[in-house]
């Protein structure tokens, strides 16, 4: 399997993804699943700026991601699939039935959310969505960087 | 220009605050720079911090890395705004130069600071 990390991070492509995870996992590509970024060349250019040239960046809508996931999984290079929201990765999981593990890397404060971990804030509804995913057999942990402890879902949702 | 430029240092963790303190310690200039950390921020929260730091004044944003959340939020904020210019790869040397050249237009000040910062990167023989 070529996708070594399915990550939820509302900062999308940033240092922890590219360097923190990308270096030790020796990734060859990042798939950013985000409808708004997919629709904007300007946003895509912005996100490419932080990625070294040897790492390919693929921008996909939710629908495209569900369709192309088998192709990315067959890629010989290790890759990261990244979404900014729980909903986006939950949809990908439901539509593909291929997501076995999810890394919650950063969901930050917004009205209606409460702090679960230093870098994870969830509303009750969002926590319930994660628990529902876990009930379907997906292993969910929170871990901002590889050297941190992987926190099991039951400790934060 | 009636108002001197504001420098906003945008960084991961506490780098920005440390650089601001170092500039004040070396120059005695206390009011030229504002520090912004991305700690605990999604892009919306970081944009709000940046907006508050700029406070509607002409400014140069000094960003730590040439990519990532600090840069993307800064570019979004500066887009189409000629009163805001950006420099990436912030270092102490460029800030020391900047605080004494705040009468320049933002883009010119940014270019000058970038040159000063670049000149400081060397590999001296030990």
Image (cartoon, helix red, strand yellow):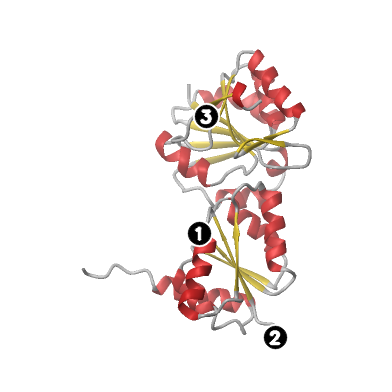
Identify the image quadrant of the N terminus of chain B: bottom right
Residue sitting nearer the eye, B84 or B5: B5
Residue A66 visible (yes or no)? yes
Residue sitting nearer the eye, A83 or A126: A126
The 10 Å Cα crowd at callout 3, few under 14, some 14 to 19, many 20 or more, is many
Q: Give coordinates of residue A116: x percent, y percent.
A: 65, 33
Query: Residue A76: which quarter of the image?
Result: top left
Q: Is residue B85 above or below residue A36?
A: below
Foreground: disc 1 or disc 3: 1
Give the label on residue A5, or none.
3
Q: CA distance from mark 1 to mark 3?
A: 29 Å
Give the label on residue B15, or none.
1
Number of callouts in the render? Answer: 3
Query: Residue B111: which quarter of the image?
Result: bottom right
Q: Secondary structure at mark 3?
A: strand
| Residue hosting label 2 | B1
Q: Give coordinates of residue A150: x percent, y percent.
A: 51, 28
Residue A41 visible (yes or no)? no
Residue ID at (69%, 56%): B47
Residue ID at (57%, 78%): B109
The 10 Å Cα crowd at callout 1, few under 14, some 14 to 19, many 20 or more, is some
Q: Secondary structure at mark 1?
A: helix
**Left or right position of A129 against A152:** right
Chain letter behind tag 3? A
Residue sitting nearer the eye, A91 or B2: B2
Which residue is farthest left? B126
Residue ID at (46%, 37%): A28
Query: Residue A156: which quarter of the image?
Result: top right
Identify the image quadrant of the C terminus of chain B: bottom left
Q: Give coordinates of residue A101: x percent, y percent.
A: 56, 22
């Amino acid at each position: 399997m070529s996708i070594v990390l399915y990550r939820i991070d509302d900062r999308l492509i940033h240092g922890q993804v590219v360097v923190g995870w990308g270096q030790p996992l020796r990734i060859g590509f990042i798939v950013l699943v985000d409808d708004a970024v997919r629709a904007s060349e300007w946003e895509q250019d912005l996100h490419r700026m932080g990625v070294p040239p040897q790492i390919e960046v693929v921008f996909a809508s939710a629908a495209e991601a569900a369709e192309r996931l088998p192709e990315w999984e067959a890629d010989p290079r290790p890759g990261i699939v990244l979404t900014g929201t729980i909903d986006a990765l939950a949809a990908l999981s439901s539509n593909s039935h291929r997501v076995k593990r999810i890394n919650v890397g950063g969901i930050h404060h917004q009205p209606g959310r409460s702090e679960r971990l230093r870098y994870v804030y969830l509303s009750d509804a969002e926590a319930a969505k994660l628990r529902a995913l876990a009930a379907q057999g997906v292993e969910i942990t929170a871990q901002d960087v590889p050297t941190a402890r992987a926190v099991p879902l039951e400790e934060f949702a | 220009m009636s108002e001197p430029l504001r420098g906003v240092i945008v960084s991961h963790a506490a780098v920005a605050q440390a650089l601001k303190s170092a500039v004040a310690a070396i120059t005695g200039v206390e009011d030229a720079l504002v520090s912004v950390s991305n700690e605990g921020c999604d892009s919306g929260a970081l944009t709000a911090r940046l907006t508050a730091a700029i406070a509607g004044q002409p400014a140069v944003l000094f960003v730590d890395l040439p990519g990532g959340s600090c840069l993307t939020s800064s570019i979004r904020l500066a887009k189409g705004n000629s009163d805001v210019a950006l420099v990436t790869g912030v270092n102490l040397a460029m800030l020391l130069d900047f605080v004494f050249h705040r009468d320049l237009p933002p883009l010119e000040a940014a270019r000058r600071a970038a040159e000063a910062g670049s000149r400081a990167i060397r590999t001296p023989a030990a």
